[in-house]
Each structure stands twice: as structure tokens, then as C-alpha cells.
Image (cartoon, rainbow, N blue to C red):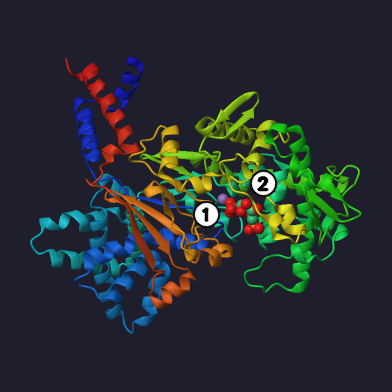
Amino acid sequence: MDTKLLDLLAEKYDSEEKVVTEIIKLEAILNLPKGTEHFVSDLHGEYQAFQHVLRNGSGNVKEKIKDLFKDEFSEKEIDELATLVYYPEEKLQLVKDHFNNDQELNEWYGETIEHMIKLISFASFKYTRSKLRKALPKQFVYIIEELLYKTEEFTNKKKYYSKIYQQIISLGQADKLIIGLAYTTQRLVVDHLHVVGDIYDRGPEPDKIMDALINYHSVDIQWGNHDVLWIGAFAGSKVCLANIIRICARYDNLDIIEDVYGINLRPLLNLAEKYYDSNPVFMPKSSTNALPENEKIQISKIHQAIAMIQFKLEMPIIKRRPNFNMSERLLLEKLDYDKKQITIHGKTYPLENTCFATVNQEQPDQLLEEEREVIDKLLFSVQHSEKLARHMKFLMKKGSLYLKYNGNLLIHGCIPIDEHGKMEKMTIENKTLAGRDLLDVFEQYLREAFAHPEKTDDLATDMVWYLWTGEYSSLFGKREMTTFERYFIKDKEAHVEKKNPYYYLREKEETCRQILKEFDLNPDQGHIINGHTPVKEISGENPVKANGKMIVIDGSFSKAYQSATGIAGYTLLYNSYGMQLVAHKLFHSKEDVLQNGTDVLSVKRLVDKELVRKKILETNVGESLLQEVSMLKKLMEYRYIK
Ligand SMILES: O=P(O)(O)OC[C@H]1O[C@](O)(COP(=O)(O)O)[C@@H](O)[C@@H]1O
Ligand SMILES: [Mn+2]
């Protein structure tokens, strides 16, 4: 081993004792039970529902409270403590309103702090002291550690406790401490969070989800097709940009663009007012339907203007990238403008609700000068939005197209395969790629596009759009996206998006084993974890497939899809005892949880049970700790053992 490296290491561990202590510490950690991993996907801007799942650790908080207090507490008391842990600020307010005098309140403070300390002690059972310390509220570390560890030194524990409690209360610190303890508990029940794609689009608050993730203690992200669309827009892809604005208009979320990310929509609005009229298929899908008619009409005009820019922008890309195999999507060229009809895949359909005022029939892929100006201005604004830059950089830093983690393969969409289960091939710059190699190259292009936001038409930037909508994109996994058809053709047959065979072959264990092998994972132990396609629990679909090898956790946080799925999302927990799938019932509001003390009841199903409790030693983290131990042992020999 390079002695320079060891010399460097010796600067940190400058005595034999320090090396020995560190080795002993690491070896001890390796033998602790593995931490709990929490998997979520398809959040689609639903911040409130996501927050709830995050705060209750997919039911883990309540489970710990039940395990600890089941003999002492009534059902109602369990709910009360759980709600306090989820939403401490609001719950404290409610509790305080309820008491008549200070004495009652102070008693409640004392008992509650005691319960919470017990809960933390229980929830941190499998962590080292130093890890727990990092999770504690900074200003109270000393006091909490005192309460957690030092009490056994005193014979009269109760007296000692109550003295500390009295002090905390009389110094007016009880609320702050309780709030701190609540967040510590939330943090302790989940060690690491995986977001298996689709943070953005459809729902109203993706930016708040991003902020929550940025502040989360440990997280990784597997990009979804909607996430790469936003990355693409920021990286200079005008067609991706047109798409995100179109989707925001469609779901009445233009304030995300305008207010949250500070992008000026005025030029687009002017264009929209000039060329478009009210159009029923472009009216926003509003969950509340509370929008005044004139606002709806204005949004429908913006929606048309940006949709037409999108359709035009797609064409030059399709032409300059024949290997994308998308010529069937040159729709504006195939259109019969006089007869108002189009022939797609050999079938002719009449067109309705058309809005082709800006289309030059001779050269339908040409933007009007005004359209070009609008999209250029939008791109400038997008690339100069500080908040968006922060969110996109975080997506790049924590994200990847797929992830191998503790023996499992996490991927938002699919591995493109043919009907015989063979990996589909795609040729990019004269290289024919399939399976894992193809995905690795996709990711390289995406990173290249992000590194060069000034390039708007290069292969890397076009490739990000391919990831959104291309046949062999591992994030999309359908033959084509029928956006145009859904706006202008009534016949539902034209709307069908044919799925890659992956989506039925993944029901078979053999397919999943093969894919795990392709990624150098052990097929006897690994699982594939997917998001992307809503599991229709309502019609009997099972999220656990292929004899437990495949777990699909898109149960739809997205309100727009809940009537089809019948639930409010799946999440997955993987602790040292095994994997559990949680099906969440519909989440109404935080207020509902607070007022009624009821939780969004979740149903748990066991996916896989570990026969022997899994230790950190057997995890990704364990692997890197082992490497550290081996380095330290080398340092020991090199420096200290003579
Ligand atoms: O529900 P909408 O807004 O019409 O969007 C439908 C489009 O979204 C997609 O389903 C992609 O989004 P998902 O990744 O959430 O499935 C496309 O396949 C489809 O064309
Ligand atoms: Mn998706």
C-alpha cells in the first residue's frame, strides 16, 4: 500500500491508542444490527402526504411506541404520543389549549419528557452513542445524555429525574426540548431513505419535497422520468422545458414555475393570448375546481401555446437522431390540415379541439420568431433560478439512474427487454449497448448534459429527452408517449401507450433473477425495487411479484391516480429482521391527524424475513467500514508495531 497514504492517515491517528480505539469502535459497529432502510417512490409533488409518511416512518414510530408502552398505555394514549412525535409544534399547541392551569400542564410536561426519553432510548438501542449524539437536538445534548445514561449512578432515580424536569420547565425550555426529542425520534426510526423516482410533476409542492430531502439525514434518489425532465430543462433542453411547463399548466401548477422558481411567464402569456382561444381539452385539471372561469381559460391558452412549442421542438431532434427510432412521432408533418385528420400506425383518425394557428404547414417543425423568443427567454430564466439550481444540483448529487444497495437493485422504471426476456439493444455513437451498459451510458450523457447547460442541441442534451420518452429508456419503458393523441384524437385506442415486455415478464422469477445477475447481484438474496407504474390494488394487483423478487412500490401518492389504485401509496421498510411492505390508506390532511388523533392506518405485509438478524457487517456501509479497518490495521503495522 502507498506509504504516503499511510503517512496522511497517521496525521489523524497520531498514536497507537487512537488507532486501536478506532479499530475496536469500527469492529463493534460492524456487529450491530443493520439500520432501517425506508423506500418511497412517485411522490409527484404531494408534500403533505410525503411529510406524513416521513414523520411516522411508515408506521415505525407507532410500532416502537406500542412495543414499549403497550402494557401501560391505552390505545388513545398511544395515538396521542405518536401524534406528538409526528407534529410536535402543532400538537403542543393543542395540548396547551386543553389544560386549565400551569400545574396540570407542568405535570404533563414532566411525564411526556420522561416517556419521550424512554422512547429514544428504545429506538436507539441498535446505534452507537456517537451516532445517537448526532441525532440529538444540539442545544440539549448534555441534558438528554444525562437523562439517558447517567441516571443509574443515582440511587434515587426518580428524585434526580424530577429535579432535571423541574429545571427544564421552570426555565421555559420544555416545548423546545419536546420538539427536539420528537425530531430525534423521527430520525432514529429510519436510518436511510431511498426515493425511487418521480418527485416532480402533477402535485403542487415538489419544491418543498426537495427542501425536505436536502435537510434529511441520509438519502439517495433514483431518478424518475419526471425528475430527468426537470434536470433536462435546467441542462438546456428546450423540449424538456416545454414539457415541464405544459404539465404544470395541465395540473394547474403554474405557480411552481412562476412563484416558487421565479420564472417569468409573461412572454408566454402574451403569445398565448395572441394565438389561442379557450379550448376544452386544455383546461387545467384542478383538484378543487375552484378556479374562476377566466383564469381557467387563460391557463388553457398557455397550455396550448406551450404544447405546440413542444410538438415543434420534438421534430428536429427526431430528425437528427435516427437511432432514437421515433420518426412515427413526426406528427405535425403527417397531418392533413385541410381534412383535419391524421394517420398513425396505418389508422386514420379525425382531429378535434385543434389549435394549429402557429403551424407553418410547409415547415411544421419551424417555430415562429415569437415562439423562439419565448422559449429562449424561458430557458434563460430557468437556468438563472437560484432555487431551481439548488434543487437540481441536489438531484444530481444524490441521484443516479439505478442503485445497487445492500444486494438489491433500485430502479424507477424498467430494464428494457424483448418478449423473450433478452436485453434490448440500442446503438449510440456506433456502440451497441444493452442492459446495465446501456443504463451506464444513459447516465453518462445525462451528467454531461448537466455539466454543459450552454449546449442545447448536442447528443447529451437530446438524450435527456430520450430518457423521458424514448422506447428503450429505463425510466419510461413504453413504445411511445401519446400526448398529442390524448389532446386531439377522441378514439381511446390511439391513446394506448404500449408497455415494454418487462412489465409482464417481471411477474416471472426467472426474469428478475436474470436482471439481478446482469447487475452482478446475488439472485438468491436480491430484490428489484421499482416505482413508476401505479399498482392497482383495487383490481387485485399484487405489488410483490415473481415469488418476492420484485417489489413495485408505486401505489400513488399522486391524488390524480388514487381512484385507480385505491390506496395512497406503498412504502417499503427493510430492517435487520427483513422487508415489510406498507400500504397507506388515503391521507386527508395533517389537521385531520392532529384533531382526531388517528393515524393514516397502514397495513403491513411481510415480503421477506431474515432467518438470522442482519448485521451492519453484511451491508454496503459494512463493506466500507471493513475497508477502513483494514487500512487502520496496515497503519498499525507500518507505524506502531515494531
Ligand atoms: O396523466 P397525464 O398527465 O395525462 O400524463 C400521462 C403521461 O404520463 C406518463 O404516464 C408518464 O408519467 P408517469 O411516470 O407518472 O407514469 C406517460 O406515460 C403518459 O403519457
Ligand atoms: Mn414515472
| Mark 1, residue position | 42
443 relative to 487 in the view: left or right: left
Q: Quadrant of residue 84?
A: bottom left
Q: Is mark 2 within 8 Å of ligand 1?
A: no
Expressed as whole percent of the image width and height from the top left, the position of residue 127 reads 26, 48
Expressed as whole percent of the image width and height from the top left, the position of residue 58 reads 38, 60
126 relative to 239 in the view: left or right: left
Can residue 42 be seen by looking at this rendering? Answer: yes
201 relative to 189 in the view: left or right: right
- Dot 2 falls on a residue whose secondary structure is loop
Residue ID at (49%, 70%): 589
Can residue 261 be seen by looking at this rendering? Answer: no
Expressed as whole percent of the image width and height from the top left, the position of residue 194 reads 44, 48
Q: Which mark is residue 215?
A: none
Amino acid at the residue labelled 2: Glu
Q: Give the vertical position of 188 relative to 621 (above or below).
A: below
Q: Is mark 1 within 8 Å of ligand 2?
A: yes
Residue ID at (21%, 56%): 148
Can you tell which of label 2 and label 1 is closer to the viewer? 2
Q: Which mark is residue 480?
A: 2
Specify the farthest residue to the left.
155
Viewer-nearest residue: 393 or 485? 485
